């Protein structure tokens, strides 16, 4: 690989190595710095045993004269604080503008984090991505990394600090990043860091970042209650923020955001510039009251994309009906609702089918697994085929007590006028061969290019497998994925599915036939 340095026109190079590369292999890669025209370099060395000596060697890449973009994945290599210290010298690369450095699981500690903060001295770096998951950096390490906000050319900063015992004090330090006048995109991975409500209240200060457009906060497993949710909702006053990604997933023994916290978060609809909201409230006891409040996020004046994970939240039919009212917000182009293991039932499913009236909707994802939607609910959801511009649709109806008749109803999705990509999960629904035969009619779909069918645990036999094999006759197939895990298709069914390879236009085939 090192001999590639002699390629006179080499500008972009991606190198992925597996196994035991060791320090000697890393040393050989450093020769790439001599490639005179090389502008973008990615080196993947995850868990390859390069150690401290390998990190020291790779720091020599800073001598690459034309290098502008560098991505080093050194996850799980025991580089330690010394390795982190020498890698911080990459700041001296003369033309480096973008640096992505993955040092997760490397025991760099607070000392290593303090060294990496030295990247702020680079006069040219405008994008920095640091992955430091599970490195015991603690509060002092987070406080040191906060000084990256002093990097003169910084526009984009991503810090993945999950599982580091950062605590509220470390989070408070990180909020000083708001003082950078030109910072436009900020991602903070703070999962399982003991952030708590005090840390959430501190994060609300990021609303004062003058140029901030994009904000991603991963606060999963941090014991945040309605108090923290109220504070985070203050981010709505950030004047230029157009994208907000927020993960507040709760561990079973933690405080919950609850319905009051959900009502607070619904105030994000007042944000003047937000066009994209992704909100993960999995297992937060928001209930129907919380769902009703969150449905009003559709009132956000510029909103084009809305994603909410509300799985395991005790949401019933009333909450489902409220979420169905998002259909009246016709500017939405992308909508994702994860309602896994709630109780929206037939009534909620029927309300959600109103999404078919959304004239701008192009991408829709609905997870209604384990919601007891019943036959009428499945029939209603099949009407989403009437959405005029829908080209990507993912529908998860795992374990909803459906049968062959409901599979036949859902197969009518083939008539959707613009649908190009469909993922339909009907696992554990007792479809048997008759239901699978009905789904084989997707071969007659007008414009479908990619089809994924989840059919695990459905008592499908060889007859059903043979029916699915007819999908090779589809009009415009490009990709087909069939999950038939834990059925009864046997040897004859498997042999029938082999004929799928005879379709010349089917570029990608994925089959899960295990436990058959």
Image (spheres, rainbow, N blue to C red):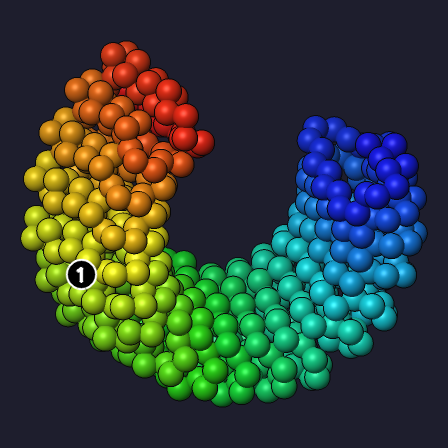
Q: Relative to 276, is 170 on the left or the right?
A: right
Q: Is residue 4 above or below residue 376?
A: above
Identity of the residue drawn at 56% across and 72% down: 214
Residue at the top extreme? 491
Query: Could you tell me residue 423's position as x and y percent?
Result: 31, 45
Secondary structure beneath dot 1 equals helix
Query: Could you tell me residue 73's position as x and y percent?
Result: 70, 46
Identity of the residue drawn at 81% across and 43% down: 10
Res. 112 in view: no
Query: Could you tell me residue 466's position as x and y percent?
Result: 22, 20
Query: Could you tell me residue 137's position as x and y percent?
Result: 70, 60
Res. 105 in view: yes
Q: Nearer the viewer, residue 385 or 154?
A: 385
Q: Which quarter shows the C terminus?
A: top left
Identity of the residue drawn at 19% across and 58% down: 386
Q: Relative to 182, is 243 on the left or the right?
A: left
Q: Nearer the viewer, residue 14 or 277?
A: 14
Identity of the residue drawn at 69% across and 51% down: 102
Q: Quadrant of residue 356?
A: bottom left
At label 1, counting other C-alpha atoms closer than 10 Å, the crowd grade (few under 14, some 14-19, many 20 or more) is: many
Q: Relative to 332, is 18 on the left or the right?
A: right
Q: Relative to 126, is 448 on the left or the right?
A: left
Total number of numbered labels?
1
Q: Quadrant of residue 256?
A: bottom left
Q: Is residue 50 above or below residue 241?
A: above
Q: Quadrant of residue 17?
A: top right
Residue under pointer 1: 353
Q: Is residue 106 above or below residue 463?
A: below
Q: Which quarter shows the N terminus?
A: top right
């Amino acid at each position: 690989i090192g001999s590639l340095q002699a390629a006179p026109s080499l500008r972009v190079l991606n190198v992925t190595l597996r196994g035991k590369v060791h320090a000697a292999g890393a040393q050989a890669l450093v020769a790439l710095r001599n490639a005179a025209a090389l502008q973008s370099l990615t080196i993947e060395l995850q868990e390859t045993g390069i150690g401290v000596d390998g990190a020291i060697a790779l720091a020599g890449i800073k001598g690459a004269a034309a290098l502008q973009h560098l991505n080093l994945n050194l996850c799980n290599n025991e580089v330690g604080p010394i390795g982190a210290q020498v890698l911080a010298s990459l700041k001296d690369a003369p033309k480096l503008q973008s640096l992505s450095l993955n040092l997760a699981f490397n025991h760099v500690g607070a000392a290593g984090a303090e060294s990496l903060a030295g990247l702020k001295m680079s006069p040219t770096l405008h994008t920095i991505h640091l992955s430091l998951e599970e490195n015991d950096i603690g509060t002092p390490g987070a406080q040191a990394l906060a000084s990256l906000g002093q990097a003169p050319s910084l526009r984009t900063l991503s810090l993945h600090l999950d599982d580091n015992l950062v605590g509220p004090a470390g989070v408070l330090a990180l909020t000083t990043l708001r003082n950078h006048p030109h910072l436009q995109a900020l991602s903070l991975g703070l999962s399982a860091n003991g952030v708590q409500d005090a840390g959430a209240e501190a994060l609300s200060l990021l609303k004062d970042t003058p140029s901030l457009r994009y904000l991603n906060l991963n606060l999963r497993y941090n014991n945040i209650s309605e108090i923290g949710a109220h504070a985070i909702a203050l981010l709505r006053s950030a004047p230029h923020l157009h994208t907000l990604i927020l993960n507040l997933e709760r561990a079973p023994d933690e405080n919950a955001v609850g319905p009051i916290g959900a009502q607070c978060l619904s105030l994000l609809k007042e944000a003047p510039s937000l066009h994209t909201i992704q909100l993960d409230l999995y297992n937060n006891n928001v209930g129907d009251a919380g769902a009703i409040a969150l449905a009003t996020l559709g009132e956000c004046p510029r909103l084009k994309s809305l994603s909410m994970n509300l799985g395991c939240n005790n949401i019933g039919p009333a909450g489902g009906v409220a979420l169905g009212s998002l259909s009246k917000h016709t500017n939405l182009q992308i909508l994702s609702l994860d309602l896994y293991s709630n109780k929206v039932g037939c009534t909620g499913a029927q309300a959600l089918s109103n999404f078919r009236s959304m004239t701008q909707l192009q991408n829709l994802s609905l997870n209604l697994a384990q919601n007891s939607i019943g036959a009428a609910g499945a029939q209603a959801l099949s009407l989403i085929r009437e959405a005029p511009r829908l080209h990507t649709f993912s529908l998860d109806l795992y374990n909803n007590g459906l049968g062959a008749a409901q599979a036949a109803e859902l197969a009518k999705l083939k008539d959707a006028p613009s649908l190009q990509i469909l993922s339909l999960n009907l696992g554990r629904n007792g479809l048997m061969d008759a239901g699978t035969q009905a789904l084989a009619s997707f071969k007659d779909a007008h414009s479908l290019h990619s089809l994924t069918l989840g059919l695990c645990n459905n008592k499908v036999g060889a007859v059903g497998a043979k029916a699915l094999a007819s999908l090779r006759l589809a009009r415009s197939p490009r990709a087909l994925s069939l999950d038939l895990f834990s059925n009864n298709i046997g040897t004859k069914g498997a042999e029938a599915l082999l004929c799928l390879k005879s379709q010349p236009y089917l570029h990608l085939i994925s089959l899960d036939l295990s436990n058959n």
